[in-house]
Amino acid sequence: MKLELENFSGRLVDNIKQDFYATMTVSNMLASVLREANQKIRESGAREGLRYEYRANVNHAVGVLKDRLIGVLMTNDMFARKHLYRELVLEIKRRVIPVRPNRKVPRKEYLKKPHFHHNHKSNC
């Protein structure tokens, strides 16, 4: 839902396939960045002796990734690309949320139907 997989930019089969595979590629990149950010968060949290375990905020990570992914991928210099990637991971690492075990209050599930025309995609 966060990457809006169901929101296609066209009606033709090729357009839908292209949107699907592009979203899956971004999803895999997001998973990779989140894995690395969560590992760094765990390492820093173990030293500080915090009450809860923390992890990266996925909503924030999606926004940061959408803003900076093209810049990381289009850079030709390998060292500059690594630097931009590290900055991306550090930016995601700055926004953390606690993982609270044994929550008593169940989360409300909002059943929201996607009401958008195929030409009107939302911005980040």
Image (cartoon, grey):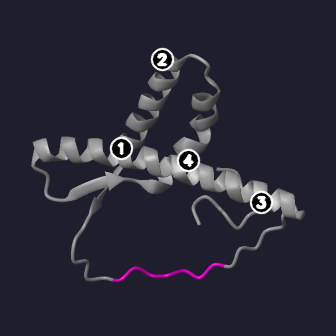
- The residue that disc 2 covers is 79
Which amino acid lies under the numbered mark 4 shown in the image of this protein? Gly
Q: Position of residue 23 (x, y in %)?
A: 65, 55
Earlier sequence position, callout 1 versus callout 3: 3
Pointers 1 and 3 in contact (CB under 8 A)? no
Residue located at (62% from left, 56% from top): 24
Magenta segment, which residues?
A: 106-112
Residue 67 at least partly seen: yes
- The residue that disc 4 covers is 63
Pointers 4 and 3 in contact (CB under 8 A)? no
Please tell me which residue lies in front, 97 or 40: 40
Earlier sequence position, callout 4 versus callout 3: 3
Earlier sequence position, callout 2 versus callout 1: 1
Asked if residue 89 lies left or right of residue 102, the reply is right
Comparing labels 4 and 2, the label whose residue is closer to the camera: 2
- The residue that disc 3 covers is 17
Q: Answer with the quarter of the image where residue 55 lies.
A: bottom left
Q: Residues within 10 Å of mark 4 (few under 14, many from 20)?
A: some
Q: Residues within 10 Å of mark 1 (few under 14, many from 20)?
A: many
Q: Position of residue 95 (x, y in %)?
A: 37, 46
Asked if residue 79 lies left or right of residue 36, the reply is right
Which amino acid lies under the numbered mark 3 shown in the image of this protein? Lys
Comparing labels 4 and 3, the label whose residue is closer to the camera: 3
Q: Secondary structure at mark 3?
A: helix
Which amino acid lies under the numbered mark 1 shown in the image of this protein? Ala
Earlier sequence position, callout 1 versus callout 4: 1
Comparing labels 1 and 4, the label whose residue is closer to the camera: 1
Distance Cα–Cα, label 3 vs label 2 = 33 Å
Distance Cα–Cα, label 1 vs label 3 = 30 Å
Which amino acid lies under the numbered mark 2 shown in the image of this protein? Phe
- The residue that disc 1 covers is 37
